[in-house]
Amino acid sequence: MLSLTLSFALLASFALAAEGEAHPSAAPFPAVAEDDGGGDDDEPGDSVKAEKAAVKVSEKQVIEEKARKKVIKTIQPKTFMKLHRYEVGPSIGLVANDPFLNRYIIGGVFDYHATEIFAIEVQVGYAPILGDGGCDDPDWKPLSCQLLEKNSVSPDISRLTGHGSLGLQFAPIYGKAAVGDKIFAFDIYGTFGLGATNTVDDLVALQAVGVEEAERTENQVHPTTTIGGGARIAFSESLALRTEVKSMTYIEVINSETLEMKNNLIVQANVSFFFPGMK
């Protein structure tokens, strides 16, 4: 009887052991975690913190990668400045719209740049008289000779001999141009001014040599309005090249009695020197 009881006890213990291996969570004894050499046991929230830290590191890497791929637009600084500087230089030009006469002008410009956009400008010019009239006159164009000699028509010819103006320059457009491996700064500007123009009538063309009325108004000075525009290319901080077109309008008296509005379209170029140096 005792042996039978022991047999049942052994069978029961083997059954409990097998059930504990199949279902570890149901084991009657607490499991013991092995020490991995990390020191004190981790608290329950440590694993959560570690996961959050890993997520933040991953997000930071993604942001940095996007930043590396992003195109960053920058504004390059101006390499040529006009602020509070003076501009002075010689100029050469011609009257482009006179069908009867060749008029070549030499002169000069003087500017004070109060800002990068606005400047006060003074311009002067002188056009020498190269002949005394007639078909052999270097100032005469073929049309003048044809009208006078072949058609017996007296063209109204007056020679521009000089001009001067005081004006305002407005330069709202600035840019850079690449030529080969060099970059040049440029600006585009407009001008408006008031001044005076000196003219001398060609009495030979008017067929009025010795006529008192014509000689009385042969040499005149006219109040003049000037409007124009041009471009300036800077080769260094102190040297630039300008090209300009301007229209000069005034009223002229012919033979002491006739009023006529004249307009001279002048095309000119000049070399500009800037001082003092850029700040």
Image: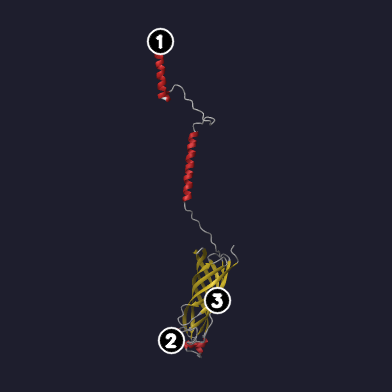
| Of callouts 2 and 1, the N-terminal one | 1
Residue 136 in picture, x, y percent from top left: 49, 87
Query: Where residue 10 sits: x, y (%)?
Result: 41, 15
Q: CA distance from mark 2 to mark 1?
A: 155 Å
What amino acid type should be assigned to the residue bearing mark 1? Answer: Ser
Name the residue located 45 percent from the left edge and 84 percent from the top edge. 142
Q: Are marks 2 and 3 in contact (CB under 8 Å)?
A: no
Name the image quarter holding the C terminus: bottom right
Secondary structure type for disc 3: strand
| Residue 192: percent from left, percent from top | 51, 71
Which residue is disc 1 drawn over? 3
Tags 2 and 1 in contact by the CB under 8 Å rule?
A: no
What quarter of the picture does the N terminus occupy?
top left
Label 3, on which residue? Answer: 107
First in residue order: circle 2 vs circle 3? 3
Q: Secondary structure at mark 2?
A: helix
Mark 2 or 1, closer to the camera: 1
Answer whether labels 3 and 1 touch (C-beta < 8 Å). no
Q: Which residue is mark 2?
A: 146
